[in-house]
Image (cartoon, rainbow, N blue to C red):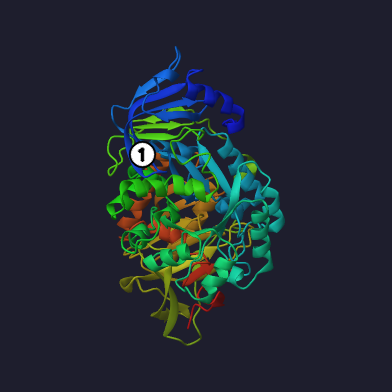
Amino acid sequence: MSQIKPWNEVAPRLIDVAMGRSPADLVITNGRWVNVHSGEIIAGTDVAIADGRFAFVGPDATHTHGADTEVIDACGRYLVPGLCDAHMHVESGMLTVTQFARAVVPHGTTSMFIDPHEIANVLGLPGVRLMHDEAMRLPVNIFVQMPSCVPSAPGLETPGATLGPDDVAEAMNWPNIIGLGEMMNFPGVAAGDAKMLAEIAATQTAGKTVGGHYASPDLGLPFHGYTAAGPADDHEGTRAEDAIARVRQGMRAMLRLGSAWHDVAEQIKAVTEHGLESRNFVLCTDDCHAGTLVRDGHMDRVVRHAIAQGLKPVQAIQMATLNTAAHFGLERELGSITPGRRADIVITSDLPRLPVETVIARGKVVAADGRLSGQFEPFSYPALARDTVVLGKELAASDFDIPAPEGSSEVTARVIGVIENQAPTRKLTHSLPVSGNIVGMDMPNDVCQIALVERHRGTGSVTNGFVSGFGYKLPCAVASTVAHDSHHMIVVGTSKADMALAANRLATVGGGITVFSKGKERALIELPIAGLMSDQPAERVAMDIDRMIDAMAHCGCTLNNAYMQHSLLALVVIPELRISDLGLVDVTRFEFTGVLV
């Protein structure tokens, strides 16, 4: 198990190194110190490291050199604190914690705050513990938030497992739990739901951070009721006024740039145009799949983007380092290059472009020039985390039929409208043809079918509806066992025969994503761990993702990051219209609604 010694155990040595009485393990010379506490960039700085922590930061560390001290000459380059992702879900990367870390460390991410509520919806508390224990083995900082809403909307969906206040209270005693994951049931909180308030109370009693998730544009009384319950942050804003409202209420506004969500540009105007205090803003991804990680980066990508929106480089770096650490009560542990903190550093030659040239975590070089050099031992997931896709029967095309009223030739249907690059959907209506008492699709006008297939208990249940926005032009189907948050199976298609083939295929391989067209499989990503994750390297998964993207595009889809949109269509806590295993859900009212008007 890879753990750093607590400060109190190494403090005597840190003092001795700083005083020149003991040699450092590693010294970085001639750097330009990006000081996120003072907002300065200080040239000619040396950094001495001992026992994985910073011991001395100043103009000359020659007094800390010893016979065995390793010396790295920064050659005038910038020394940036290791980057932190304040909110993300490893499972959305389709990778295990270990493989995710292997993918992001070369991009300068040395700390992550993960909420494993995806695996919690499939496996419950044992699944959370697996990821917690895996995270603790790694040579970087991966803190775990205990999932708060499993299910995310009680009564509107059926998860594979259920968590409650007793589970939260138990997890608060685990060594690597940093707080409560995003409190998604914001209507329940605003209504004073006893279960939600008990989970918040258990977290605050333990002195830990409560994560927020207010996914509504309504900044009236429901918002004020939610903030009164104690969530300390929120990442669901999309507008400048959202960020402003949260910061004014004492929350930290988390601004996300992931594979699908591009919410930094608008919200950062709260700082660049409205002049709000930048120390109350935090950057995060929420979330990136393996393809984005391999091709575009991780938190380095987010920081570059924030700078491009007009932030000063030091401000953007603060939002991805010190601000994050302070938010989670870890300012004395990480987030800056200052004595006593964990020795996490990114060495870069250019702040706005932020090329990640060397990455040091806990005082050891873990990546250089984009290549991993640290030790990341594989973690073996047990049998309980595998073979989790149970349909109960082999599905046929007829399982996706939507009956029409007797004698109808046309009906009006409610349609889920996808919004590119945003999590919310639109509540649409569309006239659809009827043949043989079965409602048809309207491919020319971009209306196809969506189904939510129950996959935890083998009930054989299939809930059907309609969706618009993917633009499919050919007979096809895309199926996924990543279906936030209850993670049944989402199938979207223009061909019911292909929908059945795709669903049955995922049951055979134990979960993942597949694309079928005209009766043939065009792409497959196998995710055997809880139907959510692969234990293969990110590069391998990224290749499979590329094939999936190409297959979806071949079928006519031009939507940016269409798969991420696909996987969220069952997320019944984000307006306006979603689908669950129990029916079509109007999330503006948190109630079921009929497919046909």
**Residue occupying the point 37% across, 24% down:** 60
Q: Nearer the viewer, residue 297 or 303?
A: 303
Which amino acid is tagged 1? Answer: Val
What is the quadrant of residue 336 in the picture?
top left
Query: Label 1 neighbourhood size at 10 Å, few (<14), some (14-19), many (20+)?
Result: many
What percent of the width, then of the height, locates residue 94? Answer: 47, 47
Q: Nearer the viewer, residue 257 or 9?
A: 9
The image shows residue 131, relative to residue 311, as above or below, that is above
Q: Nearer the viewer, residue 243 or 573?
A: 243
The image shows residue 49, relative to residue 336, as above or below, that is above
What element does badge 1 sit on?
A: strand
Tally the marks: 1
Dot 1 corresponds to which residue? 34
Q: Residue furthest bottom?
A: 407
Q: Residue furthest top?
A: 67
What percent of the width, then of the height, locates residue 531? Answer: 54, 50
What is the quadrant of residue 459 in the picture?
bottom right
**Residue occupying the point 54% across, 58% down:** 232
Q: Residue furthest front?
A: 19
Residue 474 in sight:
yes
What percent of the width, then of the height, locates residue 562? Answer: 37, 58
Residue 546 in sight:
no
In the shown orientation, is residue 199 left or right of residue 112? right
- Quarter of the image for the N terminus: give it: top right
What is the quadrant of residue 426 in the picture?
bottom left
What percent of the width, then of the height, locates residue 384? Answer: 64, 44
